[in-house]
Structure formats: C-alpha cells, structure tokens
Image: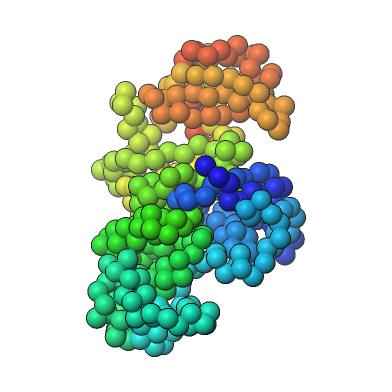
Amino acid sequence: MSILYELKNIEHYYDGKKVLNIENLILHKNQIIGFFGPNGSGKSTLFSLLSFICKPTKGEILFDDSNKIDSEIKKSIVILPQNPYLLKRSVFENIAYGLKIRDENENLKEKVDEALALVGLDSDFSKRKWSQLSGGEAQRVALAARLILRPKVLILDEPTAGVDTNSAQLIKEAILLAKQKYNTTIFISSHDYNWLNHISDKKIALFQGNLVENGNINLLFSPWIKDELGYLVKVFIDGQRLIIPNSQSKKRDSVIMINSNDIKVCKENCNEIKSENTLLGVITSIHQDDKEDNLQLDFSIAGVNFNTLVTKEEMQKEMLFPGDKININIDLSKICWI
Ligand SMILES: Nc1ncnc2c1ncn2[C@@H]1O[C@H](COP(=O)(O)OP(=O)(O)OP(=O)(O)O)[C@@H](O)[C@H]1O
C-alpha cells in the first residue's frame, strides 16, 4: 500500500487554543478512511488541513512524498463540507459547475448523467430546480458535483447528517463506486458509527484533537439495550450490566468514549469503593505508558477490551498481574458521546 499523506508533528490553534495535536499520521492511497469522534474533537479542522485549505500552525504535511503543494494538487483534492451549498440553479448546472470553471466543457451531458447515476439519480433529474429537492437528494446532488471531478482525494464531512436511510445507503454505494472506478482516496467523518463502520477500510478516532491510538481512550460500541426507565444499558455476555446515566435521549447505535483516567481498578479490599456500577474483569496485559511515568493496564470485561493507567505505587500496592481478577469503576459522569 503506498503512502499518500504523512503528517508530522501537527499542531493547530484557534485564538491561541490548541485544537489539533497529531504527532504522526500516515494515510494510504485508495482507502476509505473513517474519522469519528465527539463534537469539537477536530475532525473538520483536520479535513481543512488535509485539503490544504488551511496550513497547520505547526508541523508538516507531505503529500505524495513532497511538501510542495501546488495548485494541481489542490485541484485534485475535493471536499464536501458539512452543509454543502447548492447554486440557485438547476441540478445540471450544479453538477456541471466544477467542470465549467475548470474550462472542461466537453461531453458535459454524459458526464453529468454518469455522476447522477453514481448517486442513484436518473438523467431526468438534471432538469430539476435546486428548490425542488429533498434534503437527501440535495446531498446526493452535492456529492455528484464532486464525483464528476474524479478527484484523487474526496473528503466528506458528515455526508449523511440529516438524510434518510435510503439516501445514506445510496451515498455509501456512490462512495464505494468512486473508490473502485476512479481510485479515489476517501476520508469521511460521521457520527453514524454503524454506517461508517460498514464503509471504511480503516477507522481513526479523534478525541480532544488527539488521535485515539495515542490518547488512551476506550470506546464502547452498540449493541445497547434500553431499560424500563429508558437508560442505555451495556449488557456484557457474562450478564454484567453497565447503566449509562443521562442516556434516555441517546440512540441504540451510540458509541461512547471513556478516558483511561476515568477508570479506576482495584484487586483486593475494594468494598469501600464498590457501587452498583462496579464491574468485574480480568487484567490481560501491563505495559509502560509512552509519555507518562505510568503503567498502562489492559483488561477485559467479558471479552470487551479496555485500558486504564495506574501509577507505579498503585501497581506495587495492589500487586497487579496479568490474569488477576479486578473490580472496575468507571466515572460515567465523564463519558463522551460520539
Ligand atoms: N474557525 C474557528 N475558530 C475558532 N475555533 C474553531 C474554529 N473552527 C473550529 N473551532 C474549534 O476547534 C475545535 C475543533 O472543531 P472541529 O469543527 O474541527 O471539530 P469536529 O470534530 O469537526 O466537530 P463536529 O463533529 O461538531 O463537526 C472546537 O473546539 C471548535 O469550537
């Protein structure tokens, strides 16, 4: 697999506040890469850097092994923003617009028809006015307007936000076809984890501007059940239950992020800290944390893997070893919804 992007020591600030911090990230060609993370975790900011709309405050982005980003490269990277704007003209004019401004006026009708077909719309649709489209159709027209350019890189920021299931499915098919037909490398962000999971070759999570791999984060995925009060409950296969507070309005396909620092474990004499939400698990491995003078402790609750950080003193006091059974307390007031 060849490398398309290499990000080195990236930091990005808005008004003096750091919103992105990526030490190293490599993105390969011809992959669909799904980015997820809670609101404000930096996905859109990262996309504006990857499309070279913005320069990072610090650090370097190599594209095809070079840091010389000319207008040809910029032209080959196309972004569909969160709320795409349609021209107040026909569908045809909207889809053909990008080619026209590039002065590529040959076979416009065939090209527009092909782009429409990719997003599951027939050629008659090109006569419709922008005002005669449903939300899902407008989004697909906006996508067709990008696909017609056959970009090398296509960046889609929340392409399924607010569209119906049928449009979400058609958008997915169009993305898969673009990868196959045009060898496009595709980056997508979405809060719809299931949808993203099905389409992505690789997934990258962001949390407070950091890549999750570097951030000691735990993700807890669906399925969830709803209890009689409407709370989401994770039922582990050994029957243990974790009830998530303030979750009545959340969907059953939600994903939560738990910072490792918000998980406390205890092996013996745990009665004082035990509560109805205390779970039982088994330590699977213990290793040195990269940055801090802490140890990372990986454990499993009925086959679901988590990690937490413990200090060396805690480690010695509790005599923690792989294979040990532990009590686990998760501070559920600090979880983050994706
Ligand atoms: N132009 C801007 N000026 C100042 N702060 C900004 C700007 N754009 C984004 N931010 C801040 O940067 C952080 C990251 O925002 P960003 O939009 O990249 O996150 P996101 O993961 O895409 O969020 P969402 O899922 O809500 O779209 C947030 O704290 C946001 O408030």
Q: How is the image coloured?
A: rainbow
Image point (25%, 43%), residue name: 228
In the displayed structure, 299 sits above or below 143; it is above
List x then y, in percent, for residue 92: 36, 82
In the displayed structure, 240 sits above or below 42; it is above
Viewer-proximal residue among 54 and 185: 185
Give the quadrant of residue 319.
Answer: top right
Viewer-proximal residue among 29 and 45: 29
List x then y, in percent, for residue 106: 42, 81
- In the picture, measured across the screen, residue 304 lies left or right of residue 285, that is left
Tally of marks: 0
Image point (51%, 60%), residue name: 152
Image point (55%, 45%), residue name: 2
List x then y, in percent, for residue 263: 54, 32
- In the picture, measured across the screen, residue 297 lies left or right of residue 108, that is right
In the displayed structure, 205 sits above or below 140; it is above
Give the quadrant of residue 286.
Answer: top right
- In the picture, measured across the screen, residue 224 lies left or right of residue 276, that is left
Image point (67%, 67%), residue name: 70
Viewer-proximal residue among 314 and 119: 119
List x then y, in percent, for residue 258: 51, 39
Residue 188 in view in this figure: no
Q: Residue furthest front?
A: 106
Residue 129 in view in this figure: yes
- In the picture, measured across the screen, residue 211 lies left or right of residue 150, that is right
